[in-house]
Amino acid sequence: MNLGLVLQSLAGANAAPITAAIAAYQRALRTFDAKAFPKEYAILQNNLATAFLSIPFSDERAKMREALAVQAFQEGLKVVNLIDHPSEYAMLQNNLGNALQYVSSSHSIENCLRAMDAYDEALKVRTRATTPAEYANTIANYANCLRNLPDDVARPEHGNRKNLDKALQHYREAAEIFAAFSEAQKAGIVGEMIAEIEAELSQVRYSDEHVSAVASVQ
C-alpha cells in the first residue's frame, strides 16, 4: 500500500510508471479485503481511482479509465459509512464528485447533479469549524459544479445566473479559508475563478439593463 503511494508520487514527477502504483495497490487488496479491513480497502480504492485519473486521457481507452475510477470510488463507499468512518467517507464522496464532474460523457448535467449530491455527503463531515481546509476544497469543487449547471436543468437555454451567484459565494468563502491557511496556490486559482464569474455576471447585468432600456424606448 505504501509502495503504491511512493510509486504514484514518483509517477507524478515522471520518475516511475503509474501502472506500477496501480499494480501495488491491487496486490495490497489481496490482504486488505473489504470485510476484514474496510478502512484500508476504501483507502486503496480511492488511491486506485486517483491513479486511473492521473493517466493522460489522450487515447481511446480514456473513457474506460474514467469509468474504472468512478467504479473504484463507489466500491470504497460500499464498505465505509458516515458514522464509523467519517474521514474516509468524506474523502471518497469528495473525490467521487470530482470524478463525476469531469468525466467525459454526453450526460454532463446528470453527472453534475450526481457530483453535487456527493459533495453534499462530504460536507456532512467536512465543516468549516472542524476541518476547514478540507471544507474549503469541497465547497470550491461544489462551486465548480454550480458554475456549469443551468438554473433550470429542463431549460438550459435560460442560463445560470442564480447558480453563478451561488458559486461566487462558495468561491469567496473558500478563498478566505485558503488564504488563512497559507494555501497561496489554491487561493490564487479560486481568485481567478472569482474574477471570471464577476466579469460574467457583470456582462449578464449589462445585457439585462440594455434589454430593459430598449424596451422602455419602444
Image (cartoon, rainbow, N blue to C red):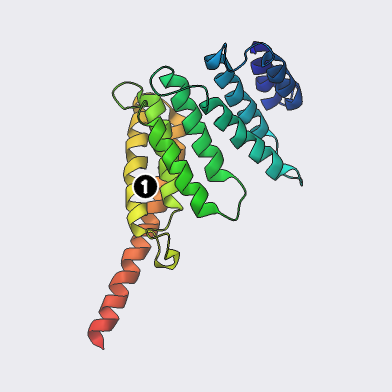
Q: Position of residue 94 (x, y in %)?
A: 47, 32
Q: Residue at x 64, y 26 (%)?
A: 48
Q: Residue at x 31, y 75 (%)?
A: 210
Label 1: state its secondary structure.
helix
For disc 1, the marked residue is 167
Q: Residue 107 occupies which quadrant of the picture? A: bottom right
The answer to which of 37 and 26 lies nearer the viewer is: 37
Residue 127 drawn above or below residue 37:
below
Q: Is residue 128 shown left or right of residue 62?
A: left
Residue 187 is at least partly visible in this image: no
Q: Is residue 4 shown left or right of residue 134?
A: right
Q: Residue furthest left?
A: 216
The answer to which of 116 and 11 lies nearer the viewer is: 116
Q: Residue at x 67, y 32 (%)?
A: 52
Residue 98 drawn above or below residue 19:
below
Q: Residue 159 occupies which quadrant of the picture? A: bottom left
Q: Is residue 45 shown left or right of residue 92?
A: right
Q: Residue at x 32, y 37 (%)?
A: 173
The answer to which of 121 and 94 lies nearer the viewer is: 121
Q: Position of residue 19 (x, y in %)?
A: 75, 26
Residue 88 is at least partly visible in this image: yes
Residue 22 drawn above or below residue 215:
above
Residue 191 drawn above or below residue 30:
below
Q: Amino acid at mark 1?
A: Ala
Q: Position of residue 201 (x, y in %)?
A: 35, 58
Q: Position of residue 160 (x, y in %)?
A: 39, 59
